[in-house]
Image (cartoon, helix red, strand yellow):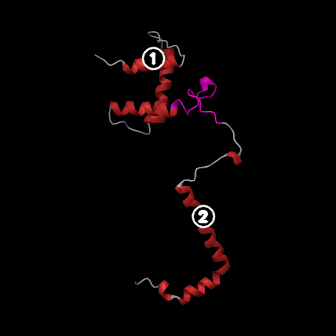
Amino acid sequence: MRNHYPLQAFQAFLAASRIQSKKTSIRSPWQNPYAERVIGTLRLELLNHIIPFNEKHLHCLLKEYIDDYYNPHRTHQGISCKTPIPSPKYIPTKSANTKLKNLFLIGFIIIMLKLLNLIIYCMKTFSSEVYLCLKNQSWLLDHSR
């Protein structure tokens, strides 16, 4: 017996989205473009870039594509170029009230930029002295060690 879970999940999604499903009529090819559009979109945006290994992998790819991209991020002309799942609304704040987390990587980048600025400053200011110092310290230039 065929598993009807994907169909039931899809019908539940349509009901939750207040979309009324309608079967296409028999021998009505003018009603087919809707299905063809969905298949074409999936092929163009997903399946032309990834080859599924098997049916289970295909189901995972489709679920990830629909849940993580198609509904929350991709705009749709049929709903006034909005996404089916609206993006969260962020309350605007002033920069003085915004607190950024100082992550290790950000701190590391800041230190590296300060060090780079110091090196550039030293090179501009003491370039002749540094050259003479390196010239006199031949052991620094000796690569045989």
Whether residue 77 appears in magenta in the rendering, the answer is yes
Task: Give the residue number, with chain letter if any, for mark 2.
Answer: 113
Where's the N terminus, which quadrant?
top left
Q: Which residue is mark 1?
A: 11
- State the residue at coordinates (44%, 39%): 49
Q: Residue furthest bottom?
A: 136
How many callouts does the rendering have?
A: 2
The outermost residue toward the top is 26
* Mark 2 crowdedness (10 Å alpha carbons): few <14, some 14-19, many ≥20: few
In this rendering, the answer to whether 127 lies above or below 51 is: below
Mark 1: amino acid: Gln
Circle nearer the viewer, 1 or 2: 2
Distance of label 1 from label 2 (alpha carbons): 55 Å
* Residue situated in front as seen by the camera: 39 or 113: 113
User: From what the image shows, is residue 140 above or below residue 118?
Assistant: below
The dominant secondary structure in magenta is loop
Q: Element at badge 1?
A: helix
3 left or right of 118 in image: left
- Identity, as a three-letter code, of the amino acid under mark 2: Leu
Q: Position of residue 80 (x, y in %)?
A: 64, 25
Is residue 79 shown in magenta? yes
Front position in the image: 44 or 123 = 123
Q: Tell me: residue 13, above or below residue 28.
A: below
Q: In terms of depth relative to the viewer, which is nearer, 94 or 124?
A: 94
| Stretch of the chain drawn in magenta | 70-90
Image coordinates of residue 22 in percent, x first then y, are: 49, 12
Residue at 53%, 16% in the rendered image: 19
Instruction: Look at the image and tell me in which quarter the C terminus lies.
Output: bottom left
Q: Residue furthest left?
A: 1
* Residue positioned 48% across, 23% down in the render: 36
Residue 71: x, y in percent?
A: 53, 29
Q: Quadrant of residue 72?
A: top right
